[in-house]
Amino acid sequence: MQGPKKFEIRTFGCQMNVHDSERLAGMLEAAGYAAASGGESADVVVFNTCAVRENADNKLYGTLGHLAPAKAANPDMQIAVGGCLAQKDQAAIVKRAPWVDVVFGTHNIGSLPVLLERARHNREAQVEILDSLETFPSTLPARRDSAYSGWVSVSVGCNNTCTFCIVPSLRGKEKDRRPGEVLAEVQALVAEGVLEVTLLGQNVNSYGVEFGDRYAFGKLLRACGDVEGLERVRFTSPHPKDFTDDVIAAMAETPNVCHQLHMPLQSGSDRVLKEMRRSYRTGRYLSILENVRAAMPDAAITTDIIVGFPGETEADFQATLDVVREARFSSAFTFQYSKRPGTPAAELPDQLPKQVVQERYDRLVTLVNELAWAENKAQVGRVVEVLASAGEGRKDTETNRMSGRARDGKLVHFTPGDARVRPGDVVETAITYGAPHNLIADGELISHRRTRAGDRSEAGERPTTQGVTLGLPSFGAPAPQPVAVGGCSVG
């Protein structure tokens, strides 16, 4: 008998897209498809796209062009395009790439299996883009990528109006899940051995705005502290305008909430922040960091920064460098401003020449790396707890190291020695060297704790959640699924 049709999902963009791809994989498996293993041809290729960066369009259409010969050779192969770029371009995708079978948007990811079947039956492309959310994504099944770490959405959409950002028009207004639903998903993952969850939202700390509780996010963090077996809680990304002292207190008081904060700055110039329509100023931003470090001196703080926003002067850019020096970020995701049609910033005068933006970008990256390296050098001798992971260290095989994340989110490459450490296990080790982007621990392990997550990883098993409140995850043995992640960070 012929086996199930095989699928492959290629993901671009932010953490929200990565988590959406888990939902897409869960739905396809529930519909009878199976993930294609490495090197295996897929019957269905799904692109989950990003629209934030300027080259996102070129990346998608270039990749679609490479698939055209395969589609011509096998007309039964199906190609689907979803995500933010699909929401933006809609039917234009099929006009530019007529070999695409399905186009679906950010509001109807649950329609993918039906659209594939309809395209197969009708022998014509299906384009379905909704203007508002059809089903909250967390009510859909999800095939998780990791046995030890999981994404849990607290909200979708965004109520901010940043002039450079196209996300609110593509993701819609913020919709919040009820706290009980969030905790049910957390508990379901932990029940199967997951040690770490990351609470996810476009603006995670505005959680509660839809049901009128401005302290809801701090309450949610504290409630996660009561989940037995949950060892680490992270969240991304908060917005400075919604960051409260209550959230800082919740982070400091709740033992399993990691002392890690990723909070986008975007610019260190108050004038540019106003043009960006970011409703805070640098004084407010730095005061938050001061309060975080007063409550948690060991906190690692990272950020997003845009260089070359329209009208940015050299003085504006110097102000950004000044804030970076004062903030002492552990690392920063730095971006050259990308003009996106449909955003207010695209219509602003004084769009900067590419060479000016590039030169400033290079100076910013140099400073960020210098400061990060100094911070990491100061970590030498520190004992850290590391959750071993898979795929973090590209040179692990040749260096006989493994990699994982410390509680503060820093990437640690460590030497396991004779210990049989699996992804999902927890080790303690001492830092021997601080590099600009990671920490090295080449001494003997201080301790090694085997976990159920490690057992699941070793067996090649991943949890598949069946919806928000529909019971515990089940486990299967999926094949590897290629995921290319790049571009923006939520927030």
Image (cartoon, rainbow, N blue to C red):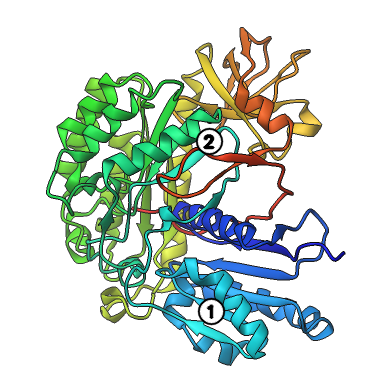
Left or right, 268 with respect to 287, comes to right
The percent position of residue 135, horizontal first and vertical second, equals 38, 64
Residue in front for this viewpoint, 275 or 455: 455
The percent position of residue 158, horizontal first and vertical second, equals 27, 60
Q: Earlier in the sequence, mark 1 or mark 2?
A: 1
**At label 2, which amino acid type do we have?**
Ser
Alpha carbon distance from label 1 to label 2: 30 Å
The percent position of residue 106, horizontal first and vertical second, equals 43, 68
The residue carrying pointer 1 sits among few (fewer than 14), some (14 to 19) or many (20 or more) residues within 10 Å by Cα, namely many
Residue farthest to the right? 1
Residue in front for this viewpoint, 64 or 339: 64
Quadrant of the image occupied by residue 267: bottom left
Left or right, 354 with respect to 247, comes to right
Left or right, 407 with respect to 317, comes to right
Q: Is residue 371 visible?
A: no
Where residue 197 is drawn, which disc sits there?
Answer: none
Residue farthest to the top? 446
Disc 1 secondary structure class: strand
Q: Please tell me which residue is depicted at 78% across the width and 84% down the height of the picture.
A: 75
The residue carrying pointer 2 sits among few (fewer than 14), some (14 to 19) or many (20 or more) residues within 10 Å by Cα, namely many
Q: How many numbered discs?
A: 2
Where does the N terminus fall, quadrant-wise?
Answer: bottom right
Disc 1 designates what residue?
A: 103
**At label 1, which amino acid type do we have?**
Val
The percent position of residue 272, horizontal first and vertical second, equals 22, 61
Q: Please tell me which residue is depicted at 50% across the width and 22% down the height of the picture.
A: 377
Disc 2 designates what residue?
A: 149
Q: Can residue 385 be seen in this view?
A: yes
